Image: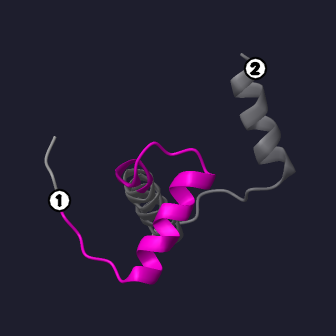
Amino acid sequence: MSTMNISLPDTLKNFVDEQVSTRGYGTSSEYVRELIRKDQDRQRMRALLLAGASSPEREPADAAYFEALRDRVRR
């Protein structure tokens, strides 16, 4: 695992320390890793949403469409 040092103003360091103590993290590194993972997830979701928004429309997503999906899952 690599090491990265970051500098934070006192207000942000105090915030991180508070999050670590109140939310059950063992270290500030654990907290920062979770934030980075959540940001990666957010970026992936954004890319998927943008790809979906720019893709051609296929069929309406109406009640019949969702019922067909449910049927496929049930089988």
Residue 62 shown left or right of residue 16 in the figure: right
Range drawn in magenta: 4-31
Q: Does the magenta stretch include residue 8?
A: yes
Is disc 2 placed on a helix, strand or loop? helix
The extreme left residue here reads 2
Res 75 quadrant in image = top right
Res 47 quadrant in image = bottom left
> Which sits in the foreground, 66 or 5?
5
Residue placed under numbered mark 2 in the picture:
74
Residues at marks 1 and 2, CA–CA distance in whole angstroms? 48 Å
Q: Is residue 37 magenta?
A: no
Residue at the spot x=59%, y=58% of the render? 58
CB under 8 Å between discs 1 and 2: no
Res 4 quadrant in image = bottom left
Is disc 1 placed on a helix, strand or loop? loop
| Image location of residue 16, percent across then percent down | 47, 65
Residue 20 shown left or right of residue 33 in the figure: right
| Image location of residue 43, percent across then percent down | 41, 64
Q: Earlier in the sequence, mark 1 or mark 2?
A: 1
Residue at the spot x=13%, y=47% of the render? 2
Magenta span dominant secondary structure: helix
Q: What residue type is labelled 2?
A: Arg
| 72 to 53, vertically: above or below | above
Residue at the spot x=58%, y=65% of the render? 57
The extreme right residue here reads 63
Residue placed under numbered mark 1 in the picture:
4
The N terminus sits in image quarter? top left
| 30 to 15, vertically: above or below | above
| Image location of residue 27, percent across then percent down | 40, 48
Which tag is nearer the camera, tag 1 or tag 2? 1
Q: Which amino acid does label 1 sit on?
A: Met
- Packing grade of label 1 (10 A; few <14, some 14-19, many >=20) is few
